[in-house]
Image (spheres, rainbow, N blue to C red):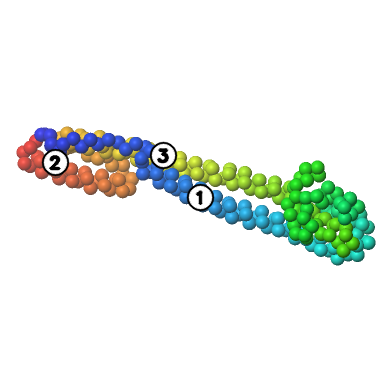
Amino acid sequence: MRPIDLGHAGLRPVGIWRSRGLRWGLAVAVMLGGSLMAMFGLMYWRSTALMLDTVDRSVVEQLELLSARPPDMLPFMIASRMNRHPAVVTLVGLFEPGGQPIVGDVALMTESIVLDGRVQAVTAPCLPSEHWRAAGRTLPNGRVLVVARSADEILEIRAGLLRNAIAGIVPAVLLCLGCGTLVGVATERRMRGFNAVAERIIAGDMRERLPERGAGDELDRLCTIVNRVLGQLERGVEARGYA
């Protein structure tokens, strides 16, 4: 059969990093990672805000409740709370106007608390719990009332959520990248086979056909159509006596 002069096609395989399968896998990984991060961020923010709001409300309610009691009764009431079994979760301290502790559990917190009745984040490394949510108020007799509750448990839960999110998001993103890479490699290998067949056809071997896998996908249908065209060309060439 006489070679068909179609010029040098220069067909070269596309590198794996330029593969559409890999690009799609990367795009899906980015979208999935972004969606998971957004979902986690919302859950992280909402759960933390809800837990902190619950703690803050308990602190404010206790501060309001004790502030409404007669000032002369507060030392006895606070001492009674300290002797309860099991121990109460919310801690209370009563101080002189100069900061000297009178009674209570939070004798070391007054210096870092703004006495406006609002809940603040306070760090107290010298206490059993380091992180606290606390509020303070100056009473009519000049004494200072402080109510606090530990936030260590909430911070531990928040750190656990972060670790679990990372443990879930990273494998999902890596899985998408891995699948995209596998698709890219498989596509690249198949295209190399197509290129080899095309080179032989250009060289004049009209009996060559593109390989079909029988998968029924787009590439298989394209191969079927191209092979039919090649068959008609081969018959036409043979009929004209070019063989």
Labels 1 and 2: the sequence-earlier one: 1
Q: Nearer the viewer, mark 2 or mark 3?
A: 3
Label 2: how many Cα within 10 Å (few below 14, some 14–19, many 20+): some
Question: Mark 3 sits on what residue?
Answer: 182
Q: Residue at 91% of width from left, 52% of height from top?
A: 102
Measure how far apart labels 3 and 1 are at the Cα level.
Answer: 22 Å
Q: Residue at x 45, y 40 (%)?
A: 178
Q: CA distance from mark 1 to mark 2?
A: 53 Å
Q: Is residue 161 left or right of residue 33?
A: right
Disc assigned to residue 34: 1
Q: Tag 2, which secondary structure?
A: helix
* Amino acid identity at mark 1: Gly
Q: Which amino acid, mark 3? A: Leu
Disc 1 secondary structure class: helix
* Label 1: how many Cα within 10 Å (few below 14, some 14–19, many 20+): some
* Residue 30, position as x, y percentages in the image: 47, 47
The circle on residue 234 is 2
Within-10-Å neighbours for mark 3: few <14, some 14–19, many 20+: some
